[in-house]
Amino acid sequence: MMMSLGLFVFSLSTAAYQEFQRQTAWRHPSSSRVGQAPARQFIGRGDDTISLSGLIVPELAGSRLSLDTLRLMADTGKAWPLVEGSGRIYGLWVIESLSETSTLFFRDGTPRRIEFSITLQRVDDSRIELLGNLAETLGNILR
């Protein structure tokens, strides 16, 4: 397991990512001052975004159904816990976008190569909230 988003596991058999990018911003708005440079004030953390990009080669590794599963998860609008295979917890994330590019087709139009990119946006502020929502999500699945 490379990483899991909710109950979806990124791996060779599903969708292995080859690149992990994370961008975190902090907010420092400015206020104009007469005769001086603008004053800046730190008002907190800004957006936190993760982009995963990878390759699916259905004949060897990965499945087209994996991208369909991620789209269904995004359609719910829910936040999902993101956990690295090492056990590192990133928090709750929503799927903001998913793109795929298919190339090298079989005669029936089935792609031999699918490049994908998924963008996740962090929506939680604490790990306590993560545990509460994880329990609720698991409860809904078990019903």
Image (spheres, rainbow, N blue to C red):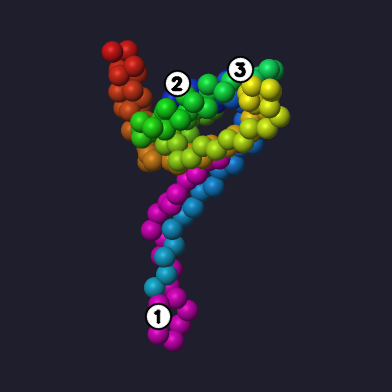
**Between tags 1 and 2, which lies in front?**
2
Instruction: Please state, as top left, top right, bottom left or bottom right, where the N terminus lies in the image.
Output: top right
Q: Earlier in the sequence, mark 2 or mark 3?
A: 2
Label 1, on which residue?
A: 33
Which of 106/16 is in front?
106
Residue 76 position in % (x across, y down): 35, 31
Label 3, on which residue?
A: 13
- Whole-Å distance between the Cαs marked 1 and 3? 58 Å
Q: Earlier in the sequence, mark 1 or mark 3?
A: 3
Decide if residue 87 is in sight here. no
- Whole-Å distance between the Cαs marked 1 and 2? 51 Å
- Whole-Å distance between the Cαs marked 2 and 3? 14 Å
How would you rate the neighbour count of disc 2 (Cα within 10 Å): few for under 14, some for 14-19, many for 20 or more? few
User: Residue drawn at (51%, 40%), measured in percent from left and top?
Assistant: 119
Q: Are marks 2 and 3 in contact (CB under 8 Å)?
A: no
Q: What secondary structure is found at the residue carrying circle 3?
A: loop
**Between tags 1 and 3, which lies in front?**
3
Magenta region includes residue 139: no
User: Residue drawn at (48%, 34%), measured in percent from left and top?
Assistant: 90
Label 2, on which residue?
A: 7
Quarter of the rendering containing residue 133? top left
Q: Which segment is the magenta one?
A: 32-53
In the image: residue 43, left or right of residue 50: left
In the image: residue 124, left or right of residue 101: left
Quarter of the rendering containing residue 126? top left
Residue type beneath disc 2: Leu
Residue type beneath disc 1: Arg
Q: What secondary structure is found at the residue carrying circle 1?
A: strand
User: Residue drawn at (30%, 19%), measured in percent from left and top?
Assistant: 140
In the image: residue 90, left or right of residue 109: left
Instruction: Please state, as top left, top right, bottom left or bottom right, where the C terminus lies in the image.
Output: top left
Q: What secondary structure is found at the residue carrying circle 2?
A: loop
